[in-house]
Image (cartoon, grey):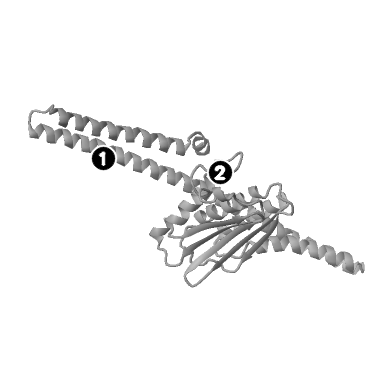
């Protein structure tokens, strides 16, 4: 029931409508006060003070409504991010359980091949299952379960699209001040953006690097797609701007918003055959800044 209600309610549209209506209300009240004051349609200073007080109360109520609408939208976005992270964790957990369940069967097959003196077949079999296990292991290198689940899901997505993916994780990001679901949103949008850019590219490749320095947690997402036109590079982070035929232009705007609110930075460099989005979050960022 809750899920169906959430699907019927577009929080972005509701928030925009609330802001628009209350902004009109503020302008109307302000115009009315100015008109009454200019036309001197009051009989005493007390009456004028009363009108101004009423106007201030109305304006204050409108401002509170706008603030509450923005808070509700933010809460809805966080709920969606948590739901996505939970789904990714469930998928990763299912994969791990499947691997554990199959492990004994794999051992029996390998043992049987060795007993039959089929060493080459045994080697090929081990190499094949080792590759599958290694794919999951490559995504289990951070201290953030939600991020691990996201990386496993994106790695599978790369395989499905025929993209050669390299995940270079040199830090577990222990102590990352930005909430895990927001980091998932940043990395998820950047990886999805790279995968979309790689459509139609011969020999598509994607590289994700995650590390840290003495002062910051760092990451980069690189692809060998056609690149971003020079006249578009300064605008890719603007809300509504997109170079895709079927896009809303919100993914990179969300990335910049999260990074800015956390005190971090995000930048892009691009040329034909190489586009790199690079970001960093300062170690000393407080929990308040991370919000």
Is residue 97 found left or right of 249 in the rendered image? right
Image point (53%, 52%), residue name: 185
Is residue 267 found left or right of 203 in the rendered image? left
Is residue 118 found left or right of 272 in the rendered image? right
How far is disc 2 from disc 1 in space, using C-alphas? 37 Å
Q: Quadrant of residue 117?
A: bottom right
74, above or below 113, in the image: above
Q: Residue 267, image x and y in percent?
A: 52, 57
Image point (30%, 32%), residue name: 25
Q: Residue 269, image x and y in percent?
A: 57, 57
Q: Earlier in the sequence, mark 2 or mark 1?
A: 1
Q: Residue 236, image x and y in percent?
A: 53, 48
Image point (48%, 53%), residue name: 256
Q: Relative to the observer, which residue lies in front, 104 or 246?
A: 246
Total numbered labels: 2
Q: Residue 90, image x and y in percent?
A: 61, 52
The disc at residue 181 is none
Q: Relative to the observer, which residue lies in front, 91 or 55?
A: 55
Mark 2, other Cα within 10 Å: few <14 / some 14–19 / many ≥20: some
187, above or below 115, in the image: above
Q: Relative to the observer, which residue lies in front, 184 or 199?
A: 199
Image quadrant for the C terminus? bottom left
The disc at residue 60 is 1
Q: Describe the element under mark 1 as helix, strand or loop.
A: helix
110, above or below 248, in the image: below
Q: Residue furthest left?
A: 44
Q: Describe the element under mark 2 as helix, strand or loop.
A: loop
Q: Quadrant of residue 56?
A: top left
Image point (51%, 51%), residue name: 234
Is residue 15 found left or right of 271 in the rendered image? left
Residue, disc 2:
242
Q: Residue furthest bottom?
A: 214
């Amino acid at each position: 029931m809750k899920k169906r209600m959430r699907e019927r309610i577009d929080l972005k549209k509701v928030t925009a409508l609330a802001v628009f209506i209350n902004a009109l209300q503020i302008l109307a009240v302000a115009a009315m006060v100015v008109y009454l004051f200019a036309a001197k349609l009051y009989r005493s200073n007390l009456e004028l003070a009363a009108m101004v007080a009423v106007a201030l109360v109305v304006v204050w109520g409108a401002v509170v409504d706008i603030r509450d609408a923005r808070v509700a939208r933010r809460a809805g976005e966080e709920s969606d991010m948590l739901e996505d992270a939970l789904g990714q964790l469930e998928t990763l957990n299912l994969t791990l359980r499947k691997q554990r369940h199959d492990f004994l069967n794999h051992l029996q097959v390998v043992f049987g091949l060795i007993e039959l003196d089929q060493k080459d077949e045994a080697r090929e079999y081990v190499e094949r299952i080792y590759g599958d296990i290694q794919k999951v292991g490559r995504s289990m290198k951070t201290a953030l379960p939600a991020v691990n689940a996201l990386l496993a899901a994106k790695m599978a997505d790369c395989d499905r699209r025929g993209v050669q993916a390299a995940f270079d994780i040199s830090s577990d990001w222990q102590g990352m001040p930005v909430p895990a679901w927001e980091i998932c949103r940043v990395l998820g949008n950047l990886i999805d953006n790279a995968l979309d850019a790689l459509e139609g590219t011969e020999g598509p490749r994607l590289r994700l690097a995650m590390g840290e320095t003495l002062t910051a947690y760092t990451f980069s997402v690189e692809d060998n797609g056609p690149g971003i036109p020079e006249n578009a590079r300064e605008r890719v982070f603007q809300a509504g701007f997109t170079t895709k035929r079927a896009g809303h232009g919100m993914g990179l705007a969300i990335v910049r918003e999260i990074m800015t609110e956390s005190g971090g930075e995000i930048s892009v460099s691009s040329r034909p055959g190489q586009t790199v989005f690079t970001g960093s979050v300062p170690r000393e960022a407080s929990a308040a800044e991370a919000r």
